[in-house]
């Protein structure tokens, strides 16, 4: 009788342990699904870039948003930079809330911090030169590929296939795709040495740091600043 009680207790403990493991696995799985759905994993941001105007600065950088918007967030990034990848959800939220609605702009600048970066920068530039207006879609895809694991031998062709571009045309374009070097010169002038490096433009001013935003403002900080400094007019 005593032995039977002990066996029953062991079986109950085993069921509890297995149940706890099952619950833990379920929590992890749900967390992964939610992370991917929110854009913090390998998912894309679900931004309709084709509906947002794109202009270029005098020195060739791409700017997303209505030309008359008074505030521009200028961000130097590297696709392979883990801090830049972690910052993407805030930038995506900023684009959806302020750029897509015409209240602000987003100026993307390229700054190398890793060896594969120049090739990736050239791919983004060439995507736009081959298919005008595709730069920010290319930017999103390159961040996605960097998070998934960039392979120098196969990723460039996969990038071209995903965006529906002619890979031979991209290879030809790469020889003269040097916007990343132009951006690097500006970064040096502004004192940006790491990524992401965040600056602001007000109307057409020179990019500057903004102490009220800090070095890497999250969407809440950006929202508070823009609503205070550039309130919506309607």
Image (tube, grey):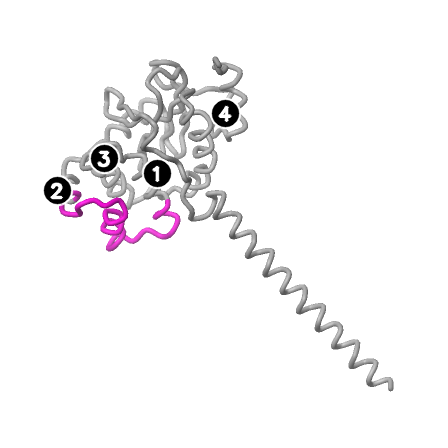
Which residues are the magenta region? Answer: 144-170
How far apart are the two marked residues, 4 and 2, measured between alpha carbons? 40 Å
Q: Residue at x 31, y 22 (%)?
A: 189
Above or below — where is 173 with respect to 64? below
The reply to whether discs 4 and 2 touch (Cβ–Cβ < 8 Å) is no
Q: Can you tell which mark lies on residue 172?
A: 2
Q: Can you tell which mark lies on residue 222?
A: 4
Label 1 secondary element:
loop
Label 3 secondary element:
helix
Quarter location, residue 73? top left
Q: Name the residue under label 3.
A: 128
Image spot of residue 61 (x, y percent): 27, 26
Quarter location, residue 70? top left
Q: Which residue is drawn at 25% across and 33% down?
A: 180
Image spot of residue 168 (x, y percent): 14, 47
Mark in the foreground, 4 or 1: 4
* Label 3 or label 1, whichever comes before in sequence order: 1
Q: Does the stretch in magenta take in 49?
A: no
* Label 2 or label 1, whichever comes before in sequence order: 1
* Quadrant for the N terminus in the image: bottom right
Q: Name the residue under label 1.
A: 78
Image spot of residue 136 (x, y percent): 32, 34
**Mark 2 neighbour class, 10 Å CA radius: few under 14, some 14 to 19, many 20 or more:** few
Q: Can you tell which mark lies on residue 57?
A: none
The reply to whether discs 4 and 1 touch (Cβ–Cβ < 8 Å) is no
The reply to whether discs 3 and 1 touch (Cβ–Cβ < 8 Å) is no
* Closer-to-camera residue (105/179): 105
Label 2 secondary element:
helix
* Label 4 or label 1, whichever comes before in sequence order: 1
């Amino acid at each position: 009788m005593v032995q039977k009680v002990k066996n029953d207790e062991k079986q109950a403990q085993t069921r509890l342990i297995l149940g706890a493991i099952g619950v833990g696995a379920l929590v992890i799985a749900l967390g992964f699904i939610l992370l991917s759905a929110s854009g913090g994993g390998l998912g894309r941001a679900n931004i309709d870039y084709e509906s947002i105007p794109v202009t270029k600065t005098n020195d060739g950088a791409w700017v997303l948003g209505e030309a008359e918007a008074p505030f521009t967030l200028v961000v130097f990034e590297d696709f392979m930079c883990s801090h830049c990848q972690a910052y993407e959800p805030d930038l995506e939220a900023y684009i959806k809330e302020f750029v897509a609605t015409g209240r602000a702009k987003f100026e993307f600048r390229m700054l190398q911090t890793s060896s594969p970066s120049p090739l990736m920068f050239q791919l983004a530039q060439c995507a736009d030169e081959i298919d005008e207006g595709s730069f920010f879609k290319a930017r999103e895809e390159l961040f996605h590929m960097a998070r998934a694991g960039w392979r120098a031998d196969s990723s460039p062709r996969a990038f071209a296939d995903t965006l529906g571009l002619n890979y031979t045309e991209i290879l030809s374009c790469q020889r003269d795709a040097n916007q990343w070097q132009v951006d690097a010169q500006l970064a040096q002038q502004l004192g940006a040495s790491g990524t992401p490096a965040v600056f602001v433009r007000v109307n057409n001013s020179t990019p500057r740091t903004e102490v009220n935003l800090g070095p890497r403002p999250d969407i809440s900080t950006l929202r508070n600043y823009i609503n205070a400094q550039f309130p919506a007019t309607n």
